[in-house]
Image (tube, grey):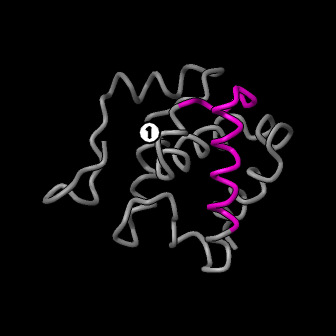
Amino acid sequence: MVGNGFMNGKMILSKTSLRQGFQAELDKKNVGIHEFVHLIDGEDGSIDGIPKVLMKQQYVLPWMNLIYKKIEEINLDDSDIRNYATTNEEEFLAVASEYFFEHHQQLKKKHPELFEILSYFYSSK
């Protein structure tokens, strides 16, 4: 979990869950990546699915539109992205990022638009 209040900016992980995240190759789940993305997302003071430290303002609206499009696909069982991504925008970012880092090529093939924007977020440009 990512802390609030006096724990703000800190991440608490179960050692077992952290290890399992890097051992299970096909599940697209990784608690370390997931919670770290919440920390990145919260750098601007709000964990809201808009990682402003990674994106310029002009990408916010296209990103939000893509989130809602992908959530709709998940809800229609027309996606291989984990259902937990439909919880809210911040969980979508974290779940999509798990997929991005754990199954880079699969995401690129199945979700090219999502792959492209996540590549932009996480590039060193």
Classify 2 as above or below 62.
above
Q: Where's residue 28, x and y in %?
A: 61, 29
- In this view, the residue in front, 125 or 120, is 120
Classify 16 as above or below 83.
above
- In this view, the residue in front, 72 or 116, is 72
- In this view, the residue in front, 33 or 49, is 49
Q: Where's residue 70, x and y in %?
A: 69, 44
> Is 75 in the magenta?
yes
The count of marks equals 1
Q: Mark 1 sits on what residue? A: 32
Q: Where's residue 104, x and y in %?
A: 74, 40
Q: Which corner quadrant holds the C terminus?
A: bottom right
Where, by quadrant of the figure, is residue 83 drawn?
top right
Q: Residue furthest right?
A: 109
The overriding secondary structure of the stretch rendered in magenta is: helix
Q: Residue furthest left?
A: 6
On screen, residue 79 versus residue 50, left or right, reads right
Q: Which corner quadrant holds the N terminus?
A: top left
Q: Where's residue 108, x and y in %?
A: 82, 43
Classify 55 as above or below 119.
below
SS at badge 1: helix
On screen, residue 45 versus residue 107, left or right, reads left
Which residue occupies 55% across, 46% down?
92
Which residue occupies 72% across, 58% down?
119
Magenta-tinted stretch? 62-83
Q: Amino acid at mark 1?
A: Gly
Mark 1: few/some/many CA within 10 Å (<14, 14-19, 20+): many
Which residue occupies 63% across, 42% down?
71
